[in-house]
Amino acid sequence: MAIKIGGDTVIDDSRIMQNIAGNEGTLYTRYNANYPLSATTDNINFSTPFMFCVLDAATTFTETGAAIGKSSQMLLDITTAGYTPTWSSNINWAEGTEPTWGDYQRWHCFFTVVALDEIRATAFGYGDITSVGTPSSWPAAAQSLARAGDTGNRTAYSDEHESGNLGATGSVSGSSSVTTYITHRAPQGVDIGLGWNGTGGAQPGYWNQSNNFISKSDGDTLDTWIETSLSADSARFVRKSIGGTVIADSGYISIGTVGNQISVATSVSRSRSTSGSSSGSNEQIVECWLRKTGYTDTNVITYRHFVEVYVSASGCFLGSANLYRWNVDTNTADIITMSDAYEQFVAKEEDAVHHVIGTDGNNKEILAFSKFDLEDTFYAFNGNDTFVSSSHPFLTTDGWKCCNLEDGNHDYPDLELTQLAVGDTLQKYNAATNEYYEEELTSITPLTGETKEVYLLDVGGDDTYVVDGYVVHNK
């Protein structure tokens, strides 16, 4: 039955409107506050009536919260790049025909659950993608200092070496990183740069366009890709393994205001709570993407970062080892076990001073005394009792040496240590005669995989003292 107004048919028998002109209406741009628009990236959530999604890549959508009778709407923007959405087999488009998504940039999609495996859908498109002109590629950087990274070339490097005494710190930790940042420069343009965190190891830095390594320092930053004519609306990092597997994708993040910056770090860290060393490395490829309306989303530069870290922790002596303390009243050495010396030190009056004798024949103050449990390899010399952990330096006629050279070199980098071995000549002290003498090392006996209570001294002067008659060093 047709509908007439004033004798004129406005809706005919086929339900088609006729003779309508001069319409007026209100465009509502905001839904009821009880049902706000919610962002989604790849999901139709039927517990959320109104959603919006801006694609940054070809995306497959799934559904959650579906129940018979529920419905939901989505405002979908495939951007000027024309990213294609795909849907699960549960989605049934009107008349069995999925929309041609490339026809429009923006779509209003409706979904209604008829059965859990039948979700009926319609979509209305608007905003012709070509209306903004054919997208062009992002312009090349006005200046690019660092070489791009690929399977054969690294862009940036950082290294961290940390060492310490467990008695003072309880643990030793270190970390190394190379950071990539993207900044909206002033007054316009984009800066992509690098930052370094790493000390004590190999020199950090980057490779320039001529493939020469340029050294940097811990805490340095440098703009390495500079575009001065065009500012980006947003930027994105994609981190990949050397094999090309995506580790993380930041998605596009707004940098539309001068000074806005995003960053991502390739990092590695290690910690030691027992004597010995730990090392690690991390290598990643970082793609830097920029987005601007009217331009194709572009991976403008790819960097490859390699970072390393090495940490080592040192212990000291067992409680049964003998410490040679110095009596300043009698000018003689008192021999006392480490455990007894420790107990007397912690029980002494605040202004009392305990001394030891070292390599120079002079006494020096004990500044600190620590006791803690340590898992390590411990050593005995010349058939005597086990008394020392792995990295402690001993004075020989050929300089300072230790049982574990790798750990010792990182704990005591200024001593120029070498490996202690049978046949070396150790410097010793005779408390009875107050004289120094030499003793050949005829055997070294390790005790591995043990946890022992050990003692650590911090002394003044030249950091040397005497344990079991041997002249030793304490950093």
Image (cartoon, rainbow, N blue to C red):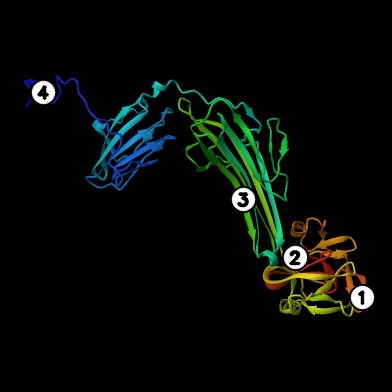
- Tell which circle, 4 or 3, labels the residue nearer the N-terminal end: 4
- Tell which circle, 1 or 3, labels the residue nearer the N-terminal end: 3
Q: CA distance from mark 2 to mark 1?
A: 28 Å
Question: Can you give x and y, in whole percent of width and height, for residue 375 in the image?
Answer: 67, 68
Question: Can you give x and y, in whole percent of width and height, for residue 15 in the image?
Answer: 13, 26
Q: Quadrant of residue 132?
A: top left
Extreme residue in the front direction: 351
- Tell which circle, 2 or 3, labels the residue nearer the N-terminal end: 3
Q: How many marks?
A: 4
Point out the image quarter for the C terminus.
bottom right
Mark 4 closeness class: few <14, some 14–19, many ≥20 residues within 10 Å: few
Q: Is residue 277 above or below residue 255?
A: below
Mark 3 closeness class: few <14, some 14–19, many ≥20 residues within 10 Å: many
Mark 1 belongs to which amino acid?
Answer: Asn
Q: CA distance from mark 2 to mark 3?
A: 26 Å
Name the residue carrying label 1.
Answer: 434
Name the residue carrying label 4.
Answer: 12
Q: Nearer the viewer, mark 4 or mark 3?
A: 4
Name the residue carrying label 2.
Answer: 390
Q: Residue at x 72, y 34 (%)?
A: 212
Q: CA distance from mark 4 to mark 3?
A: 73 Å
The foreground one among 323 and 34 is: 34
The reply to whether dot 1 and dot 4 touch (C-beta < 8 Å) is no
Mark 3 belongs to which amino acid?
Answer: Val
Mark 4 belongs to which amino acid?
Answer: Asp
Point out the image quarter for the N terminus.
top left
Q: Residue at x 85, y 70 (%)?
A: 470
The reply to whether dot 2 and dot 3 touch (C-beta < 8 Å) is no
Residue 268 is marked as: 3
